[in-house]
Structures are given as structure tokens and as C-alpha cells.
């Protein structure tokens, strides 16, 4: 993904942020950011897409890439389950899925998945240590750092430390931006690894 495309994506993101601010703050459109409203639903969809991309990357590749992608997949799935109240969905969802989607079932499933993440990290620790700087300062690494920073900022809005009367809107906006950057990071990981693999295949056939 080239720099021009990234600049266009960020410009569109800033425009979208401005429009959300205009409607939510200037026009008191609480339907945008209230509980289970549009912004929360978009967050859930974005997190689910990031989880799917991470899972595909994890399955297709091995080693450090697989470990990083698996962590992204589990994080995206965790965010999705946090944003969606499965037990309140008005669909004929099997009880087993409802149980896995909230309460003890959800917590047990996420615990097992995160144990798997830490097990993968332990397996790849030497590789992580060796490539730490390149991981952190890669485009996807920088996006993840910014994403985590926005989540910390959203927590300050949630606790009403910042944001004033519209702290709920700013909390949801920071979370939405963070999840979109997380999705972009997961996509960049997949693209960069696929490109590197294709280049390696071409060299091996020459």
C-alpha cells in the first residue's frame, strides 16, 4: 500500500470525523453515538473484519507473521464481542452461540484464545526480540501504536476526565478511529507478507 493511498485514506478519515462532529456536536444527533447506535455498530463490523483478515493471514503463513496475525485476530474478535450484545440480538441464534457470546461462555472462550496468543508469543520470542524494532516501526506497527493511544484517550473521555458535555461522542469517535486504524494495520500486515512471499517465489523460480 503506497503512501499516496494512505494519505487519501487518512484525508477521508479526517473528513468523516469532521462530518460526525458536525452532526453529533453541532446538531445534537445522539442517535449516532448512543448505546448500540450507528457508531458502535460500525465499530463492531470493523473489528470483525479485522479479526477475519488476521485469521486468514494466520492460516496462510507461518512463524512470526502467523503469531502477529493470530494476536490481531483474537484482539479483533475480543473487540467485536465487547461491542455486540449477543443475547439482545433479535435473531434465532442457537443458545450455544448466545452462551459463547456473553457472560461466562464469552470470558472462557477469550481466556483460551488469549492463552493461545501468549503461547505463540513464547514460541516466537527469539524472533520477536530479534525483529522488535522493525515490528514496532513498520507501517502496521505505527498504526497499532496510534490505535492503542486513541483507546487510552477514549478511556479518558469515558471517565469524563475530558470531553465536557459531549464526552460520550468523543469516546465513541476515538474508539471508532482506533478500530479503523487497527483494521488498516491488519490489512497492511497481510499485504506486506503477501508481497514479500510473491517476491521470494519469483526469485526462487529464476
Image: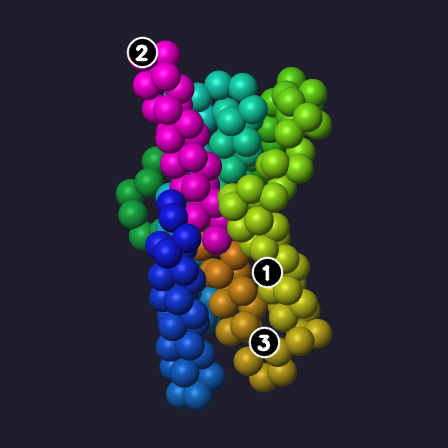
Q: Earlier in the sequence, mark 3 or mark 1?
A: 1
Q: Which one is nearer the viewer's eye here, 188 or 92?
A: 188
In the image, residue 105 lies at what x, y percent?
A: 53, 35
Does residue 95 appear in the picture of this structure? no
Q: Are dots 2 and 1 in contact, CB under 8 Å?
A: no
The residue sitting at 36% across, 61% down in the picture is 8
Residue 62 in the image: above or below residue 52:
above
> Quick check: is 191 in the magenta stretch?
yes
Rendered image: mark on residue 167: 3
Residue 185 in the image: above or below residue 40:
above
Q: Is residue 100 left or right of residue 153?
A: left
The residue sitting at 51% across, 27% down in the picture is 65
Mark 3 vs mark 2: give the one in front. 2
Does residue 199 appear in the picture of this structure? yes
Span of residues in magenta: 181-206
- Reading the image, the residue beneath label 1 is 150
Q: Report the magenta stretch's main SS.
A: helix
Q: Which one is nearer the viewer's eye here, 183 or 43?
A: 183
How far, Cα to Cα, is label 3 from label 2?
57 Å
- Reading the image, the residue beneath label 2 is 205
Amino acid at each position: 500500500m503506497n503512501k499516496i493511498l494512505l494519505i487519501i485514506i487518512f484525508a477521508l478519515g479526517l473528513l468523516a470525523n469532521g462530518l460526525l462532529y458536525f452532526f453529533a456536536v453541532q446538531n445534537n444527533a445522539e442517535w449516532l453515538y448512543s448505546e448500540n447506535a450507528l457508531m458502535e455498530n460500525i465499530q463492531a463490523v470493523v473489528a470483525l473484519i479485522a479479526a477475519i483478515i488476521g485469521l486468514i493471514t494466520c492460516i496462510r503463513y507461518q512463524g512470526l507473521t502467523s503469531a502477529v496475525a493470530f494476536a490481531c485476530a483474537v484482539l479483533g474478535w475480543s473487540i467485536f464481542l465487547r461491542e455486540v450484545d449477543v443475547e439482545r440480538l433479535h435473531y434465532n441464534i442457537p443458545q450455544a452461540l448466545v452462551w459463547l457470546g456473553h457472560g461466562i461462555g464469552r470470558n472462557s472462550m477469550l481466556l483460551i484464545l488469549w492463552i493461545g496468543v501468549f503461547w505463540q508469543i513464547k514460541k516466537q520470542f527469539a524472533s520477536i526480540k530479534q525483529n522488535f524494532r522493525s515490528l514496532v516501526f513498520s507501517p502496521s506497527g505505527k498504526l497499532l501504536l496510534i490505535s492503542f493511544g486513541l483507546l487510552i484517550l477514549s478511556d479518558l473521555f469515558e471517565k469524563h476526565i475530558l470531553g465536557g458535555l459531549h464526552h460520550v461522542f468523543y469516546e465513541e469517535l476515538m474508539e471508532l478511529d482506533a478500530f479503523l486504524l487497527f483494521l488498516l494495520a491488519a490489512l497492511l500486515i497481510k499485504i506486506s507478507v503477501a508481497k514479500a512471499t510473491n517476491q521470494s517465489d519469483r526469485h526462487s523460480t529464476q
